[in-house]
Image: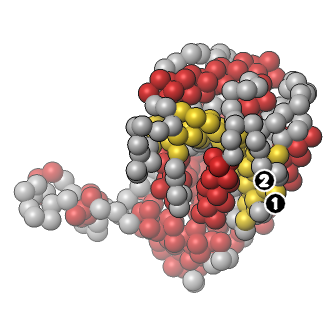
Amino acid sequence: MPRFICLSLLGLLFLLNPAHADWAYREPQEIDALAGDALVSLESQRAGWVLEGLNLEAEGQLAEAAACYIAALQPDSANFEVLLRLAGCYGQLGEASLAAEALRLAQEAGLRNISRRIDDPRFDPVREDYSFRLAADVLRSREERYHEQMGDSLLVPMGAMGSVRYFLPDDYDEQRSYTLVVMLHGATGTPENVAAWGMQMPHRDFILAAPAAPYPVFSDHQDSRIWWPGGIEDGLRMSYLEQCADYVSQVVESMRGRYSIGKVVLGGFSQGGMLASYCALTRPGAYDALGCFSTTLYVTDELPRRELDFPVFSGHGLRDTAVRPEQSEMLADFLEEQGCTVTRFSFDGGHEISVQELEAFCDWLDALNAQPAGNIAAASDV
């Protein structure tokens, strides 16, 4: 795509006015609220443009991806996540001033960790450009001033009432017992992520429970949650882990109070997987099996070494850059060293749970449920 088209689209982001974009900027007196198509103006193709931009970016069509991101930003110009994608495209294209401007807009839209974002490798082609370096210094200074105005922070673990979504099998029979699968979402995720995974499972003869992490992380666009904050000292980190582990135990007991539960399988994705492995290692006998998805061992020296006998499903994308495959293998190796039987599954993907992985997990659960208590199937590689 010619550069002038990208520049023209960027200009549209700032020059739109009611005369040129009635769909977005009509005054109340210009709106017929009772018209048959009154709500059409609320429909937005933003999500579709973002998805197309991500696909184009993955294919290396950076200018075209930038145009899609700008189109998505026209009705939502304060979306700093899309602005960051746009800035990254400009960085890779060598457009230093445009990359810097998109970063500035992202910071004004509410992004509070601009320093870390500037270190993204996508900005390597423009990092030494004078205009980009100057803009980066200004953005970092603004971030420092913001943190100074906010004062010093102190993180203190707190107890809170937890929220859990759970799903019964389609053919649920109250006269029989079911395996309970407690799945912990990843950092900045929600139980809705687990619900989406559940819908992709080819067969589910178990009860699926999805607790919400206790700590909300708000942005302009979603309510996401984390199990514990990053960058904290070891003692405080262990306090968070213990509190969350107790919460997961309470989830299991609450489900037992409602339904007839047989085996209990604890699983988790990414940060949720770190918590799941911590729970299984520190509460022997509480869980019958462990599912680890795109995750690793968060703590090692603090954990007791003991003889373990529960089966483990370990899945990971080979192109995962958030938690590298070798980090996942480290957790699987550690669990095997303690006596666990580990079924390993890998797929051609990134930091995600793939449909193929969910199919393999369900097959693993079926085999687990076919075994009587205490009779564990041998480890395997899928």
Residue 296 at x, y = what percent?
A: 79, 43
| Front residue of this view, candidates 130 and 205 | 205
- Disc 2 crowd rating (10 Å Cα; few below 14, some 14-19, many 20+) is many
Residue found at x 88% / y 38%: 339
Q: Position of residue 4 (x, y in %)?
A: 54, 79
Is 279 left, or right, of 54 in this rendering?
right
The answer to whether one can see residue 345 in this image is yes
Residue type at mark 1 is: Asp
**Residues under numbered marks 1 and 2 in contact, where contact means CB atoms less than 8 Å apart:** yes
Q: Tell which of 169 and 294 is nearer to you.
A: 169
Say which amino acid is labelled 2: Thr
Task: Using the rendered image of the protein, determine whether residue 222 is visible from the camera's viewpoint.
Answer: no
The residue beneath circle 1 is 381
* Residue at image location 8% in from the left, 62% down from the top: 35
Q: Residue furthest bottom?
A: 2
The number of numbered badges drawn on the structure is 2
Q: Quadrant of residue 115?
A: top right
**Residue found 56% across the figure and 38% down from its top:** 180
- Circle 1: is it few (<14), some (14-19), or many (20+) Cα within 10 Å? few
Q: Element at badge 1?
A: strand
Mark earlier in primary sequence (1, 2): 2
Question: Helix, strand, or loop for circle 2?
Answer: strand
- In this figure, which residue is indicated by the disc labeled 2? 343
| Residue displayed at 65% across by 38% down | 266
Q: Nearer the viewer, residue 300 or 57?
A: 300
Q: Residue 237 at x, y = what percent? A: 75, 24
In the picture provided, is 339 more to the left or to the right than 372? right
Q: Residue 161: which disc?
A: none
Residue 182: image quadrant is top right
The image quadrant where one finds the N terminus is: bottom right
**Spot occupied by residue 270 in the image (x, y as percentages of width and height):** 69, 45
